[in-house]
Image (cartoon, rainbow, N blue to C red):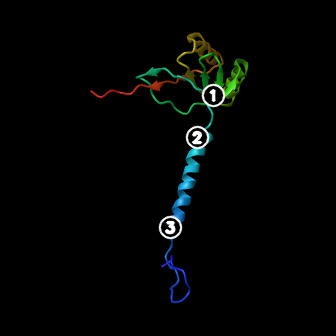
Amino acid sequence: MAGKLGGQGEEPVTDINIVPLVDIILVVLIIFMVTATYIVKPAIKVNLPDAATGEPTENSSLGITVGANGDLALNGDAITEPALREAVRAAKAANKDVVCLIAGDKDARHGDVTHIMDMVKQEGVVKFAINIDPLPTATP
């Protein structure tokens, strides 16, 4: 046995003790679970409105977010309106088939979201979608 002391008449230990291996794996798993919450990409919290008739969209070229207080973000990065206009122009120049996905916070002013939609259309982008949180469908 591995727990006996003494040197005479004992056979060498040939079993592999997996308890330390399991302990190490559990510690690594706990470290991974704790640090995974810090690795997540920071995003602007937007309380999207609910709708039952939403459809998935294709890959969007530009993701525009309008926050509750009117803040703008392009693909998750804060941006000003003139810079957003330039980014839309640059995307339109690089690709004629630009798609904008506009996410307006539920508490954002309707005029702010409409203004961004109008600005996108002024820059020649005709394909855009409104981002929503889908309502859970009730089964009859």
The outermost residue toward the bottom is: 9
Distance from the alpha carbon under mark 2 to that under mark 1: 38 Å
Q: Is residue 104 left or right of residue 88?
A: left
From the image, state whether disc 1 or disc 3 is nearer to you: 3
Tag shown at residue 52: none
Secondary structure under tag 3 reads: loop
Residue bearing mark 2:
37
Q: Position of residue 129 (x, y in %)?
A: 53, 23
Q: Residue at x 44, y 25 (%)?
A: 54
Tag shown at residue 96: 1
Of pointers 2 and 3, the one earlier in the residue sequence: 3
Q: Quadrant of the C terminus?
A: top left
Q: Amino acid at mark 3?
A: Ile
Q: Amino acid at mark 1?
A: Lys
The outermost residue toward the left is: 140
Q: Residues within 10 Å of mark 2 (few under 14, many from 20)?
A: few
Q: Residue at x 73, y 18 (%)?
A: 82
Q: Residues within 10 Å of mark 3 (few under 14, many from 20)?
A: few
From the image, state whether disc 2 or disc 3 is nearer to you: 3
Distance from the alpha carbon under mark 1 to that under mark 3: 60 Å
**Number of disc labels:** 3
Of pointers 1 and 3, the one earlier in the residue sequence: 3
Distance from the alpha carbon under mark 2 to that under mark 3: 30 Å
Of pointers 2 and 1, the one earlier in the residue sequence: 2
Q: Amino acid at mark 2?
A: Thr
Q: Residue at x 36, y 27 (%)?
A: 137
Please state which of residues 92 and 114 is positioned toward the viewer in this rendering: 114
Q: Is residue 99 left or right of residue 136?
A: right
Tag shown at residue 18: 3
Q: Position of residue 66 (x, y in %)?
A: 60, 20
Res 40 → quadrant: top right
